[in-house]
Amino acid sequence: MKFSYLENCYKQWNDILVIGKTIERNNKKYHIVGMTLADEAKLYVIEPYNGAENYSDKIKGVRNQRKLLKENRENDVKEDTYLHCSDFCLGNQWLRVQQGSSGSLRYSKENYEEIQLFLDMLRAGWIIPEWLKDEEWDTLQLVTLVFADVKKLPEYSPEMPIIIKHRPDSIRHILEKTITLNVGKSRSFSFVDTYGDKVQCFINNVTLIDVWKDTEEQLKQRLSDTKYTEQFSEEQLQEIKEHCYKALGQSCSRGTCYIGIEYECSKDINLQFYSKEFLKSVPVTHKGSSAFLMMNLKPDKKMGTHNLPLRGSVIQTAVSPDTVKIPAELFLYFEKVDAWEESV
């Protein structure tokens, strides 16, 4: 280790606020340590570490897209974490969360920045609760929330209420249901969700999307907007245009199409389809240009023919414009989680 490392991890706070409040919920304990103010205002929460097993350790052989999608298990299970909070109210002052991060305390014995944080909190009056004193750091994680536009830490005393707004991410559920899509045709199917409920789905239409035509029209509109173009020189605008086409060409060559799906579901969920071809493929690293961004299909109507919300999905596998049948999978679905408010 070099002494320069100490310079990087040493913090001098403009202000520090001890909160020291334990929350008990769903047979778990969480502890709001406090806040610091330097370049940014941050709040720190110690909570149970999920300790999910590393799925990638179980994967043998070449990692194709199917295996990689299964490795990404971040939202497979709903976690009772404060990482997804959107707002905190201390006393009568609301604080908007700008971003957050979390990490196991397992390796914090070597993380002098976190050690210093805890020591500074102790010097400022933090009292470690009895239940936390003998907890192994391997079983805990530290959530750090950054607040927007805070120049001064709020006034706080232990009798003041704390209100927390939670906005959890959608939960991802792997399904891997084989389904054949036919261009211009409708069909229905059902599946049993993670709660044992039967979900009825209706595909109203399957279309081929001329991505190049749509992209060229979008670029034309963007480049005719003076509020946008005045920020760049002619050379820069040409580079943006060429970069966009190059990125698109890496995944969808000119003359090919993507697959658009309009569907309805008896439950308030979002479906994610992939082609069999994509799931079998091995990721290709592109050089000199970023990969094209995920597309969304927004139906023109709000409700479908079965009086259910009409939704759209795009399979970003390039197919020829005369394609009629697409072997595919309903690979996963996203369960929406309602926002909720907690008073402490």
Image (cartoon, rainbow, N blue to C red):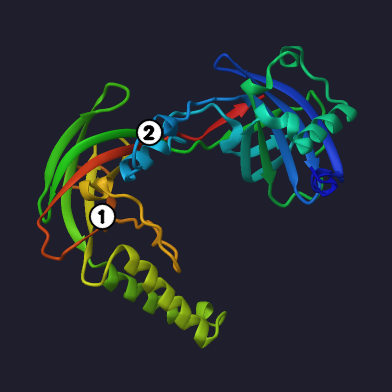
> What kind of residue is marked 2?
Ile
Looking at the rendered structure, which numbered label has been put on residue 312? none
Q: Vertically, is 55 above or below 304?
A: above
Q: Residue furthest right?
A: 123
- Please identify, in this view, whether the residue under mark 2 or under mark 1 is nearer the observer: 2
Q: Residue furthest bottom?
A: 234
> What kind of residue is marked 1?
Lys
Residue 335 visible? The answer is: no
Q: Residue at x 69, y 50 (%)?
A: 148
Q: On the rendered structure, is 213 left or right of 163?
A: left
Of the two numbered discs 2 and 1 on the same chain, state the one appearing first in sequence. 2
Q: Residue 261: where, in percent of width, then height?
A: 22, 52
Q: Vertically, is 188 above or below 250?
A: above
| Residue highlighted by disc 1 | 301
The residue closer to the viewer here, 61 or 96, is: 61
The residue closer to the viewer here, 152 or 330, is: 330
Q: Residue at x 50, y 87 (%)?
A: 234
Looking at the rendered structure, which numbered label has been put on residue 59? 2
Q: Residue at x 23, y 67 (%)?
A: 210
Q: Quadrant of the C terminus?
A: top right
Q: Residue 151: where, in percent of width, then height?
A: 80, 50
Q: Residue 278: where, in percent of width, then height?
A: 26, 50
Disc 1 crowd, CA 10 A, few/some/many (<14, 14-19, 20+): few
